[in-house]
Image (cartoon, rainbow, N blue to C red):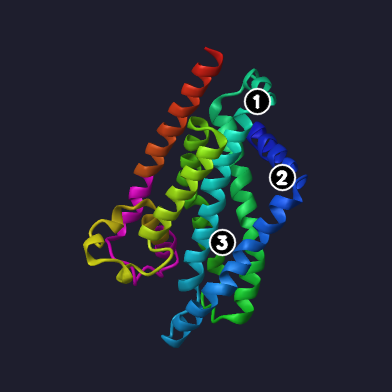
């Protein structure tokens, strides 16, 4: 665990040296919520529901944007860096490096939520008890792990530019079909039977079910456990991509 935290700390320090990246990234969730989420939050209030119904999809959307895209682009860029060859010589397992990157990215996400949550608490009817917030936000962090593995799988398999393009494409498709952009009811009826098997939908269900707010989502309670299957699949893809890259570069 010590080496995992050291890897996460190194990535955090590297990011701090690039304010052109982290400053817009920290402000993006708040700006995006003010432009689009505030209206939805007020609509839920008109229905007698708390704004957590509207805030949760925005938390998931911004988290996935950073997790999938930044990991894919970051890993792909690091592979082009000569320093990566030195890191590969360290007596550490790939799992330690994977976990270090995940801890860093997920921690960055948590920090980026702070402005959004503060504004939402004062401008919307947020009815979720404060005691339930650790469960709520912890579920968002935990549910993002499989998508972090997907980002790493893309980063270890493709060059930086194709990796970024593919990660953004997959992210947009998963966000749309997972109901993060629009409610499931607004999607074509032919997709309603498929949507519960999309990992982003399961992510949303998992988070809302833990705070007892999944009543407007279709699907049985066990649907959240399908995330475990996606997690295993993405982990295998990330491991296979890492091993392939290692074989190509180092024989």
Asked whether, in this view, residue 249 is left or right of residue 226, the answer is right
Q: Mark 1 or mark 3: which is in front? A: 1
Residue assigned mark 2: 15
Q: Position of residue 98 (x, y in %)?
A: 55, 34
The residues colored magenta run 206-228
Q: Quadrant of the N terminus?
A: top right
Name the one closer to the observer, 127 or 171: 171
Of labels 2 and 3, earlier in sequence is: 2
How many labels sit on residues?
A: 3
> Disc 2 vs disc 3: Cβ atoms closer than 8 Å?
no
> What residue do we see at 46% from left, 43% from top?
166
Residue assigned mark 1: 84
Q: Position of residue 213 (x, y in %)?
A: 41, 70
Residue assigned mark 3: 134
Of labels 1 and 3, earlier in sequence is: 1
Asked whether, in this view, residue 205 is left or right of residue 144, the answer is left
Q: Is residue 200 magenta?
A: no
Q: Element at badge 2?
A: helix
């Amino acid at each position: 665990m010590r080496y995992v935290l050291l890897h996460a700390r190194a990535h955090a320090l590297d990011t701090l040296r690039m304010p052109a990246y982290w400053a817009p990234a920290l402000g993006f969730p708040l700006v995006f919520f003010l432009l689009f989420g505030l209206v939805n939050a007020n609509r839920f209030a008109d229905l007698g529901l708390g704004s957590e119904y509207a805030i949760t999809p925005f938390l998931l959307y911004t988290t996935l944007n950073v997790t999938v895209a930044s990991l894919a682009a970051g890993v792909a860029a690091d592979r082009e860096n000569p320093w990566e060859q030195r890191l590969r010589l360290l007596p550490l397992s790939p799992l330690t490096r994977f976990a270090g990157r995940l801890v860093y990215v997920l921690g960055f996400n948590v920090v980026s939520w702070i402005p959004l949550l503060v504004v939402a608490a004062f401008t919307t009817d947020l009815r979720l008890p404060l005691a339930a917030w650790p469960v709520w936000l912890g579920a968002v962090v935990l549910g993002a792990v499989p998508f972090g593995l997907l980002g790493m799988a893309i980063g270890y398999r493709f060059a930086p530019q194709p990796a970024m393009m593919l990660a953004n494409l997959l992210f947009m498709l998963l966000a749309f079909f997972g109901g993060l952009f629009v409610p499931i009811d607004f999607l074509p009826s032919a997709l309603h039977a498929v949507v519960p098997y999309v990992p982003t939908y399961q992510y949303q269900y998992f988070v809302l079910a833990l705070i007892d707010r999944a009543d407007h989502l279709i699907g049985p309670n066990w649907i959240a456990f399908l995330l475990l299957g996606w997690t295993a699949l993405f982990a295998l893809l990330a491991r296979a991509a890492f091993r392939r890259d290692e074989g190509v570069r180092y024989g």
